[in-house]
Image (spheres, coloured by chain):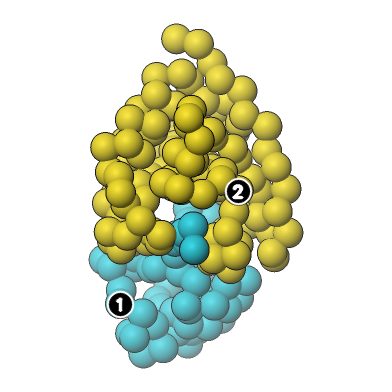
Amino acid sequence: MIIPQPVLDAMIRQAYDELPNEACGLLTGLDAKVHKHYPLNNLDHSPEHFSFDPKDQFRVLKEARADGLKIIANYHSHPSSPARPSQEDIRLAYDPDTVYIILSLAGKEPAVKAFSIRKGAVTPVEIEIEEG
Amino acid sequence: MSKIKVNEEIQEVTLPLSLTELIRTNSATPEMVSVQLNGDFIPQEKFPSTGLQDGDEVDLLYFMGGGAR
């Protein structure tokens, strides 16, 4: 998955801005290349849980189609735990075709990792940061 | 056979067909997805009673949630 540096910076900023709660959002793009970043409302407003508002998801879907893009990844932050899927993340990872990105603020520096999650099986996905 | 567009792909289906049945034929369960039918958001409790018609456009999006706990 290729993420432009400005998109990654915006995701990290959002994660800090929404502390102590988890932040979340969607990424649209083509194939494995991210083009746009959509910070979304965490319906749960919780430091330990997040849910997207389905109406926000449909809004992003509509805009992605207008741009000729697809929703290729979602992300959420872990304010105080590592950048790996929790049991809850795995239980609720229904979409086998998307990439799940987790952004941890638990360490001195933010950590970002990506995963494919299919039927409970977690596979790391390499992230390449594109300068610019 | 009738044609319904699901996530922008044409599917041939036999009517009558409810939203719940369409979701199941697309390898999902009603609890996993949110649905728009011809651009209108359909609440989950209406999936079983919502019948589809030839030419309908359905968008299915997986529920997204999780967390650190």
Side of A81 where A117 appears, left or right: right
Which residue is depicted at the point 40% across and 61% down? Answer: A49
> Which residue in the structure is indicated by mark 1?
B43
Q: Position of residue B38 (x, y in %)?
A: 31, 64
Up the image or down, B41 lies above or below A20; here it is below
Amino acid type, residue under disc 1 in the picture: Pro
> Which quarter of the figure is the C terminus of chain A placed in?
top left
Visual hue assigned to chain A: yellow
Chain B is which colour? Answer: cyan
Amino acid type, residue under disc 2 in the picture: Arg
Name the side, left or right, on which A11 lies relative to B6.
left
Residue A14, labelled with which disc?
Answer: none
Of residues A8 and A53, the one drawn nearer to the viewer in this rendering: A8
The answer to whether marks 1 and 2 mark residues whose Cβ atoms lie closer than 8 Å is no
Q: Secondary structure at mark 2?
A: loop
Q: Which residue is mark 2?
A: A84
